[in-house]
Amino acid sequence: MTKTQPNKTQEKHLKKSPALARAIIISVFLLCIAAGLLLFFLHREEKNTYSYSPETKILLYHLVRDETYGDYEYLFVKEADFENQLREIQRMGYQTVFADGLSELEQGEKAIVLTFDDGYSDCYETVFPLLKKYGMKATFFISTALLGQENHLTKEQILEMQASGLCRFGSHTVNHIRLDEALTDEAERELEESKKELEALIGEKVTSLAYPNGAYNDLVELLAEKCGYLYCYTTNPPTEPYYENTALPRSYVVRDMTAEEFSAILES
Ligand SMILES: [Zn+2]
């Protein structure tokens, strides 16, 4: 058979094909980009990443008590200073939100997250009455093995605080261990068991966590996410405009902090 020349219709098709192929390739390419973007945003939404914004000030306290004990005097904020700090928060027009409420904030909305680590008994004796006086919310991170121990909150106190609607509780592991130095199994157990015990006590989901000693690494972040924590707090001060929810920054409030230094955190 000899090779023949294309007829009129074939010629038309031949001319069209490169353009058609190009159009198909471009369409597929654009579809891939659109699908990729969609997946990216869906994943971001699902992971709840970047709910932190610079308008949110997250404060880290331990104790509010005039008399000190133990080696860490700087952790004991004086009662009058604490009350003045709450007044300053009020004066500057900040609302207080719980540690697991960041994603409910509108973009640019001013908010303060008051957090207390370790669950000391003065959280009930000193902090709770002042929260009621000023109608402010706070989150307390509890190491469940310390519940009911000397100078620590009891289960009954936690339930009373929870019932007020002004206090919420998050995990600070079971034994207050450094998660970055623990074996994977142990770290996972500490994260899981403290969450379960707190949830059984208060009858609500526990989705916030404060890393003991602020110590974490990539693996710890993954484990925390796997265990169902949506908001994980470090002890790093904020220096960037945005943070992943697995490494949220906090500003330390300590005994010797002046009123000006405290106001500077709120104004930053
Ligand atoms: Zn701690």
Image (cartoon, grey):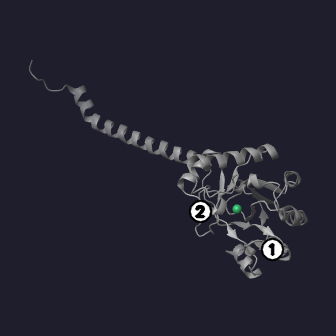
Mark 2: few/some/many CA within 10 Å (<14, 14-19, 20+)? some
Rendering coords of residue 240 (x, y %)? 58, 67
Badge count: 2
State which quadrant residue 199 falls in: top right
Quarter of the displayed picture in which ligand 1 can be seen: bottom right
Quick one: 40 or 194, which is closer to the camera? Answer: 194
Taking the spot 18% from the left edge, 26% from the top edge, the residue there is: 6
The amino acid type, in three-letter code, at marker 2 is Tyr
On residue 79, the disc is none
Q: Helix, strand, or loop for circle 1?
A: loop
User: Which circle's residue, 1 or 2, is located before the other in the chain?
Assistant: 1
Question: Distance from label 1 to label 2 (Cα)?
Answer: 36 Å
Q: Secondary structure at mark 2?
A: loop
Query: Residue 68 bears which disc, if any?
Result: 1
Mark 1 Cα shell of 10 Å, populated few (<14), some (14-19), many (≥20): some
Q: Amino acid under label 1?
A: Thr
Instruction: Return the residue nearer the eye: 2 or 197.
Output: 197
Q: Which residue is mark 2?
A: 242
Furthest toward the left, the residue is: 2
| Above or below, 164 relative to 122 | above
Residue 58 in the image: above or below residue 30: below
Locate residue 206, reporting x and y percent.
73, 48
Residue 209 % position (x, y):
68, 54
Q: Quadrant location of residue 134?
A: bottom right
